[in-house]
Image (cartoon, rainbow, N blue to C red):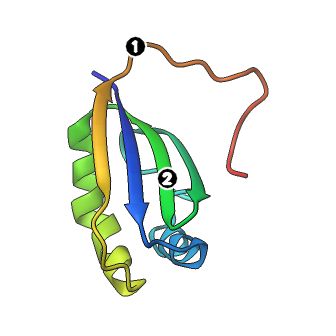
Amino acid sequence: MAVVLSLRWPGVTPGQYDEVRDAVGWEEQAPDGAYIHVAWFEPGALRVTDVWESQGHFERFRDAQLMAAVVKAGITTEPEAEYQTLHRRFVAPGVTGAD
């Protein structure tokens, strides 16, 4: 069952986020089970909303790829994460790719 991951990660900068994104390459080769990723910044924190095929799919990606890049980028804080079961998703016609 698909899940929505809502994440707030204090102390992560745009530069660190970009470093992790580049190291992992999720836009070039989407992780197994990843559907949607949206990221933005509020003062002092990274915010992310993801949709994954399951919580397990995200956790496998986190453990196999993401965490090594997080450590290398110097991120030392822990994220606040919450999973909820997806009820419905909609992608507007013509919306594709990364931006």
State the quadrant of the N terminus. top left
Q: Is residue 67 left or right of residue 88?
A: left
Q: Residues within 10 Å of mark 2 (few under 14, many from 20)?
A: some
Residue displayed at 52% across by 70% down: 17
Where does label 1 land, which residue? 87
Q: Is residue 78 above or below residue 23?
A: above
**x then y, percent, for residue 83:** 28, 35
**x then y, percent, for residue 45:** 48, 63
Q: CA distance from mark 2 to mark 1?
A: 21 Å
Q: Residues within 10 Å of mark 1 (few under 14, many from 20)?
A: few
Element marked by disc 2: strand
Q: Is residue 2 left or right of residue 13?
A: left
Q: Is residue 91 above or below residue 20?
A: above
Select label 2 or label 1 by which is in front. Answer: 2
Element marked by disc 1: loop
- Of all residues, the one furthest to the top in this rendering is 87
> Where residue 4 is drawn, which disc sits there?
none
Which amino acid lies under the numbered mark 2 shown in the image of this protein?
A: Arg
Q: Is residue 49 left or right of residue 74?
A: right
Which quadrant holds residue 71?
bottom left
- Of all residues, the one furthest to the right in this rendering is 94
Q: Is residue 63 above or below residue 75?
A: above
**x then y, percent, for residue 50:** 45, 41
Q: Is residue 51 above or below residue 39?
A: above
- 18 or 47: which is nearer to us? 47
Residue displayed at 74% across by 32% down: 95
- 88 or 98: which is nearer to us? 88
Residue displayed at 64% across by 23% down: 91
Where does label 2 land, which residue? 47
Which amino acid lies under the numbered mark 1 shown in the image of this protein?
A: His
